[in-house]
């Protein structure tokens, strides 16, 4: 049905439309960015397939001993206002 759909004249018309849309000056930059994107995509796909081949590392859960105590924590009031200087500003006077 579509065996003869892509002919050289179709490709030529498509190329002319692309040049008109993007301009001749932007085509090298466009081709470069597409190439870099494909390179990154292939690299990521390769890393994903390599990750699937590697066995998952085993995780050891370490629990603290019952006798070990943590040091007490002093609560801090974060809503307290900073001390004011006599002039009413919060910065100390400069000498």
Image (cartoon, rainbow, N blue to C red):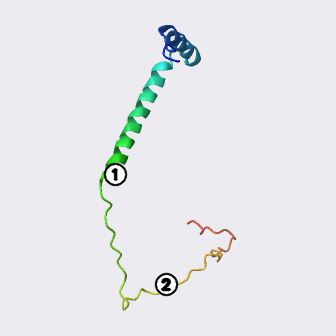
Q: Where is residue 15 in the image (x, y as percent from the top left)?
A: 51, 13
- What is the distance, in whole Å, between disc 1 and disc 2 at their CAs? 42 Å
Q: Is mark 1 on a helix, strand or loop?
A: helix
Q: Which mark sits nearer the N-terminus, 1 or 2?
A: 1
Examine the rendered structure and indicate whether residue 41 appears above or below residue 70: above
| Dot 1 crowding, Cα within 10 Å, few <14, some 14–19, many 20+ | few
Residue 57, image quadrant: bottom left
Q: Where is residue 6 in the image (x, y as percent from the top left)?
A: 49, 14
Instruction: Name the mark on residue 36.
Output: none
Instruction: Say which residue label 1 marks.
Output: 51
Work out whether residue 68 or residue 20 is closer to the camera in this orientation and state it. 20
Instruction: Say which residue label 2 marks.
Output: 73
Q: From the viewer's perspective, is 84 left or right of 57?
A: right
| Most distant residue in the bottom direction | 67
The residue sitting at 34% across, 51% down in the picture is: 51
The residue sitting at 36% across, 40% down in the picture is: 43
Q: Position of residue 13 (x, y in %)?
A: 54, 10
């Amino acid at each position: 049905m579509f065996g003869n759909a892509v002919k050289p004249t179709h490709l030529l018309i498509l190329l002319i439309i692309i040049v008109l849309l993007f301009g001749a000056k932007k085509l090298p930059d466009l081709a470069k960015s597409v190439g870099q994107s494909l390179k990154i995509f292939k690299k990521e796909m390769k890393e994903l397939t390599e990750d699937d081949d590697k066995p998952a590392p085993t995780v050891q859960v370490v629990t603290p001993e019952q006798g070990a105590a943590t040091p007490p924590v002093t609560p801090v009031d974060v809503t307290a206002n900073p001390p004011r200087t006599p002039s009413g500003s919060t910065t100390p006077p400069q000498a």
